[in-house]
Every structure is written in C-alpha cells, then in structure tokens.
Amino acid sequence: MLLDDTTKGVPPSARIAQEAVSSMGWNLLHEDFDLPVCVLRQTAMENNIKWMQSLVNDQGALFAPHGKTYMSPTLFSRQLEAGAWAITLATGHQVRVARAFGIKRIILANQLVGRAFARYIFQEINANNDFEFYCLVDSFENIKALEKLAHQEALRRPLRVLIELGYPGGRCGCRSVNEALALAEYIDNSQYLDLHGVEGFEGYIHGDGPENVAAKIRTFLTDLIRFTQTTDEKGWFVEGSILLSVGGSAFYDLVLTETAGAHLPARCKVVTRSGCYLAHDAIMYRDFFQQIQARTPSIGNREHGLFEALEVWSYVLSRPEPGRVILNVGRRDISYDDLPLIHSLVQFEAGGAGRIQPLVDHRVVDVNDQHLHVACPEDSPVRVGDAMVLGVSHPCLTFDKWRNVFVRDDNYNIVESISTWF
C-alpha cells in the first residue's frame, strides 16, 4: 500500500510504500510530523496481545477478539498469530474487509439481517469450504428469513448460529430462557441452520455500584449456563464443540471465573471477545481494569497487566488568555466519551531532539471539532508550537478517525504503519 500526505498524520511530501516506513528514520521528537498524529506504543501493544492470549489459554477458553475496535487486518493477523481462535466483527462491511484479507473464521456478534449481506455470506459459504462463519439469532422472524434466502441461494452447508440470550433493557437477545429454548427446538429441525452454541453480552448491565453490577452479571451468566445445559440435554446442539460466547472488554474476569466453576457440557468451549484490551486506554478501560484487579486479583494482577498503548500527539495553537491553552486536535481526531488526558509536554528545539516531560495541573475542559481547550496555571511552561501527548478514553472511537496509525518504539522512532478500514 502507498502512503502519501493526503492521509491524515502522514508527514508532508511523503509518498512511500507502507512497508518502507521503518526505514524512513522518522521520530516524533524530531518534529518529522505535521500534528495531530495517532500512535500506538509498540511495547505496550505487544504486551497486551500476549497478556490476554495467555490469560484465555490458561483458563482453557478460546479467544475471538473483537475487530471493530481498530478494524485493521494487520492487527487481526497479529492476534491470530498469537493464538486467537477467530475474529469477532459486527457489520457486513467489517466481515467483507476481513474476508478480503483472508480471515477464515469469523463470529458476527450480531444478527445476520438484510438480503444483500445474507446473500454475500451464503455465497462465501458455498464457494469456500474453509470459511467458518457464526452469527446470532434471537427471533423466529430472522430465522425464517434466513431459511427462505438460504433455499433461494441453494446453501450447501448449514449456517452456523448461536442463540443470543439478552436481558430487559439490554441490546438484542431473547428476553427469557423459555423464548430461547423455543428457538433452539425449531433450529434443531431446520434444514439450513445448525445450532452451535449460545451468546450473550454483559457489557450493558447496569446497577448501583460495581458490586451490584457484578452480582447482576453473575445472575445473567447463570441464565446462559442454565440455557446451555438444558439445550444440550435435549440434544438440540449439533455434533462437535458447543460454543458459549460471552465476555467483552470490561467483565471478562467474571465470565472466565463463573464459567470455570459451572457444570457445562464436556464439549462446551467458552469464547471471550475483548477488543479494547489491545490498545487499552487512559480512562474508561483503565478504570475497568482497576475494577478487575480489585474484584479478581488472580486475573487482574497477572504479570504486568495491561498497558495504555494508544496516544494522540497535537500542537499547541494558541495561549489566548492566562490559564488557557488551545490544541489543534478535536472531535475529528480523538474520542470524547470522556475528555482526553494530558500526559506530557514536548518542547521542540531548533536543530535537535525535542524534550518530553510530564505535565501536571493541566486538564482538558472542552472539545470542538478541531480544537481542544486546556485549563492551565498562568505560569505554565507551555509555548505556542509545543506539542502535547494525549491519552484517550474508549479506543474504538479514536481508531475510527484515522486511516493510518503509526507504531513507535520506546525511543519515539516510527517502526511501522498500520492501516484501518472503517
């Protein structure tokens, strides 16, 4: 792939093959970039991939990281090489990107809806015997629409489905075990669908404080386990492994510990789907991980844990009044679920490397499309033309603003370029 300076973050006048990035000698402290630029820290990212895969392996589970976080086939491949069992995705576009880059096993953590998308999947199944695709179902309407189109497309292998169990006020999913059992019995007699397991997403369960949320999640997991046990006893799962897919980026510790102590069928495999772990973050998932450390020390305190890997660098545009700094980064460049954190200040020196130093008593107070407002002491050392390194909250909504993300080493050298496909 060719990189040029029409892509945000790529240095001015650059026009090079992506694989040549590491040979360019670019360094963030040498002011080689026209900021803002989005960067992954190499050592943190590699640690996070290894840490999560090791955890899941040690628990005897399978890992299908959610690719929607970063939508990068390069990172899909890196996770699969580390031992991931599959890639999880959410939309037709995401699935087509993954297939274009050769991903052979995909979990669609959604219902397969819409004629064009379903036809594409059926054609892929018919044309590729090595394509293993799973999707969710939670209604007779969806199931019967899939069966009708499968007949029209002469589907040669049954569609692999997982019944989604939900909860009141949540997203998709059957709202009761009995409703889910009725679907399971129907699928058992379907010519075009095979029931391979059960799915749930615990991330939208809310409550009064962390302990109450954890208790509600345990109750939900009990429902999922009970449904899996009952469906197996009735013989409604197909032969082979039964998949129990649950566990996003916030409560995977509960999923792993609760299912480990359950009387699941011997052929049942738990599949977790965290995606944000790879980049982690400075606020939202940092806080979730601290809760994991307090709730389940055997998991949260393993080795070094997860490290923040994603950062956005931006210039200081203006100091328009005492106590205020304006940066050239905004909603077009960085997540604003929570206001970004300021990690450090970079002061560039003529003819030499910039100096990077911690920055205290500076905080983001507002964000516009292309500007970030920072409150600071009146005697702040920040100058126009300096740079700030920002920590993000919710990495999904930072990645999707960049077609290219650079990877830096611990000396701020750029060692890789990663494309995203949002």
Image: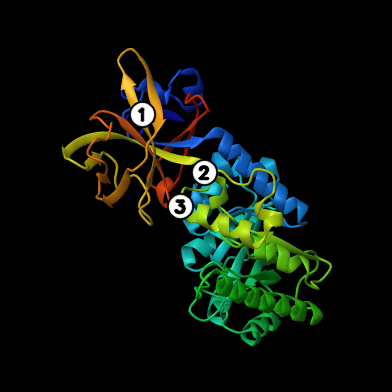
Name the residue tied to disc 1.
Answer: 346
* Colour pattern: rainbow
Measured from the top left, where is residue 43 in percent x and y? 58, 34
Vertical comparison of 305 with 115: above or below: above
Q: Of the residues shown, which amino acid type is indicated by label 3? A: Ile
Label located before the other in sequence (1 or 2): 2
Name the residue tied to disc 3.
Answer: 283
The kind of secondary structure element at disc 2 is: loop
Residue positioned most to the left: 321
Vertical comparison of 84 with 121: above or below: above
Residue positioned most to the right: 266
Q: Of the residues shown, which amino acid type is indicated by label 1? A: Val
What residue lies at 30% left-to-right and 15% top-to-bottom?
A: 350
Residue 179's disc number = none
* Residue 152 seen in the figure: yes
Name the residue tied to disc 2.
Answer: 308
Vertical comparison of 296 with 224: above or below: above
Measured from the top left, where is residue 173 in percent x and y? 56, 76
Structural distance between the alpha carbons of marks 2 and 3: 9 Å
Structural distance between the alpha carbons of marks 1 and 2: 19 Å
Tell me if mark 2 has few (under 14), some (14-19) or many (20+) residues whose alpha carbon lies within 10 angstroms of its own. Answer: many
Label located before the other in sequence (2 or 3): 3
What residue lies at 65% left-to-right and 59% top-to-bottom?
A: 272
Q: Of the residues shown, which amino acid type is indicated by label 2? A: Glu
Measured from the top left, where is residue 224 in percent x and y? 67, 75
Of the pair 22 and 118, the residue shown nearer to us: 22
